[in-house]
Amino acid sequence: MQQVMELANSNIMWLVASIVICIVIFQSIKFIQLASKTGIEQGMSKKEVNSALKTGAIAAIGPSVAIVIVAISLIAFLGNPLTLLRIGVIGSAPIESVGASFAAEASGATLGGAGYDQMVFTAIVWTLCIGGMGWLLFTALFTKSLGNTEKKLTSKGEKSKKTMGIISTAAIIAAFGNLVSAQIIQGLAPFVVAVAAGATMVIATKLSEKPKLSWLREWSLGLSILISLCFGYFFI
């Protein structure tokens, strides 16, 4: 295990991870700049653009807390650089932990346990990196095509724009519904936590319609996650 961690925290691992993270930070800054510029070009005021950016930043806090908790547990087995690299690129800590466990088991070892050596660690690195390529390749190859398809659909009139809005909303509901349904069928506790999170979101959204409580709109997602976590921890 000591030899594995020496490799996991070696200078070459830090170098590779740092390069990737620097690219991610550069992309993030450019995306924010392009989004702000496009928002102004589309008729949004500077205040609206700043509000949208602030909403996105605040909404990212809640999910990031859960990722950080899982990432801390991964550091003990995968080291700091690889954990930073995978979470920085993909951002799904549960999937990374499952992938690491599967790779270790396929190599005849257990993650951080018996048989966990440098060869197993190398297999885990390849598994996580190759396993995450699909998301990145799809984004690189098909994002422009999807954008062109959207333009063709929305250029056919107001009815097409409404249809596109319905499809987008349905896709989001289906994605989150699939994630939630996989949890609530596991028992009463996950079901109650999901209901608490949904109720908090609905209440926060309704209250945010009042001028003095408009700030709740920006904090609704993080607030719902926090309350549901507290609800599940203290009351179940």
Image (cartoon, rainbow, N blue to C red):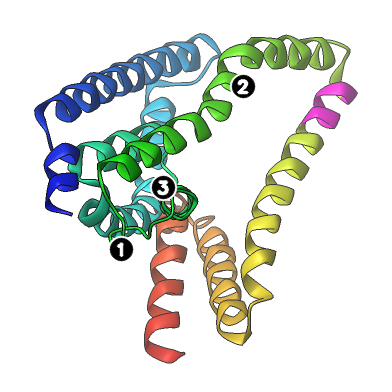
Residue 53 within the magenta-colored segment of the rendering: no
From the image, tell me which residue sits under label 2: 138
Q: Is residue 140 left or right of residue 2?
A: right
Disc nearer the start of the sequence (3/2): 3
Q: Residues within 10 Å of mark 1 (few under 14, many from 20)?
A: few
Disc nearer the start of the sequence (1/2): 1
Measured Cα–Cα span from mark 1 to mark 3: 40 Å
Q: Which residues are magenta?
A: 159-164
Q: Residues within 10 Å of mark 2 (few under 14, many from 20)?
A: few
- Closest to the observer, 57 or 146: 146
From the image, tell me which residue sits under label 3: 59
Image coordinates for residue 18, horizontal then vertical, percent: 19, 24
Q: Are marks 1 and 3 in contact (CB under 8 Å)?
A: no
Could you tell me which residue is drawn at 15 percent across and 24 percent down?
12
From the image, tell me which residue sits under label 1: 114
* 199 is higher (above) or lower (below) than 102: below
